[in-house]
Image (cartoon, helix red, strand yellow):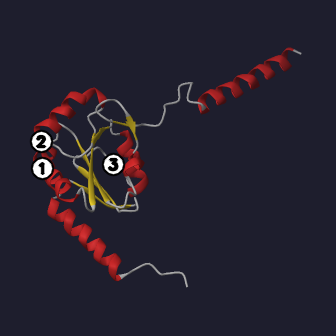
């Protein structure tokens, strides 16, 4: 009889733990989120598939190359935001680095939206979409087509002209190879 009670207690405990884990109430971490400068939660999906190219600049406030090259994305966003390209910044300083993120944005007069990550969201996205591990390199650029599919990635500096050339080349390729129409 005692064995039955113990077996039953273990079953109830396992079921309870499973339910708590599935609800995220027992030691399980919630999925990582991107935060805006006010602490609001966002996902990358909010920005994808809006009929425009999305260029995601992954940066860090203490990254020398990011500090030198962010003006290229500021210019790209200014030239194309109302047309065909949107820029989104993701600072990997973590929310505890919010002051450094804001100082970077202010110093460089960044004109595109920026979110804060501790690197986990970008790491997961990069691994899923690129099929390789991301090691926190900044800047990293992820380019999504107007349908929201990852089209290209670049680790290191890239110019406004290079992105414009890439987008124009993709548009030209699509125009010369239109999708088949159902017949």
The Cα–Cα distance between marks 3 and 2, rounded to whole angstroms, is 26 Å
Left or right of residue 42: residue 37: left
Residue located beneath label 2 in the image: 108
Left or right of residue 48: residue 80: left
Please tell me which residue is depicted at 30% across the width and 32% down the height of the picture. Answer: 94
Q: Quadrant of the C terminus?
A: bottom right
In the rendered image, residue 163, in percent from the top left (x then y), is placed at 21, 63
Mark 2: give few (<14), some (14-19) or many (20+) Cα within 10 Å: some
Earlier along the polypeptide chain: callout 3 or callout 2? 2
- 111 in relation to 2, above or below: below
Q: Quadrant of residue 170?
A: bottom left
Residue located beneath label 3 in the image: 134
In the rendered image, residue 17, in percent from the top left (x then y), is placed at 65, 26
The tally of labels here is: 3
* Dot in front, 3 or 2: 2
Kindly state the secondary structure of the residue where label 3 is placed.
Answer: loop
The Cα–Cα distance between marks 2 and 1, rounded to whole angstroms, is 7 Å
Q: Which mark is residue 162?
A: none
Left or right of residue 34: residue 114: left
Looking at the image, can residue 157 be seen? no
Kindly state the secondary structure of the residue where label 2 is placed.
Answer: loop
Please tell me which residue is depicted at 57% across the width and 24% down the height of the picture. Answer: 26
Q: Quadrant of the N terminus?
A: top right
- 35 in relation to 73, above or below: above
Residue located beneath label 1 in the image: 71
Q: Are marks 2 and 1 in contact (CB under 8 Å)?
A: yes
């Amino acid at each position: 009889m005692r064995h039955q009670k113990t077996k039953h207690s273990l079953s109830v405990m396992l079921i309870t733990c499973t339910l708590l884990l599935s609800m995220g109430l027992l030691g399980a971490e919630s999925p990582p989120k991107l935060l805006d400068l006010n602490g609001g939660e966002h996902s990358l999906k909010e920005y994808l598939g809006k009929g425009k190219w999305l260029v995601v600049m992954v940066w860090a406030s203490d990254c020398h190359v990011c500090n030198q090259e962010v003006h290229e994305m500021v210019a790209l966003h200014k030239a194309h935001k109302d047309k065909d390209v949107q820029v989104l910044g993701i600072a990997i300083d973590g929310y505890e680095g919010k002051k450094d993120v804001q100082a970077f944005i202010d110093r460089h007069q960044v004109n595109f939206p920026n979110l804060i990550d501790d690197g986990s969201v970008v790491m997961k996205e990069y691994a899923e979409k690129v099929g390789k591990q991301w090691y926190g390199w900044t800047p990293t650029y992820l380019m999504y087509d107007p349908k929201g599919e990852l089209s290209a990635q670049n680790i290191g500096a890239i110019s406004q002209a290079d992105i414009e050339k890439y987008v124009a080349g993709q548009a030209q390729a699509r125009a010369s190879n239109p999708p088949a129409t159902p017949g």
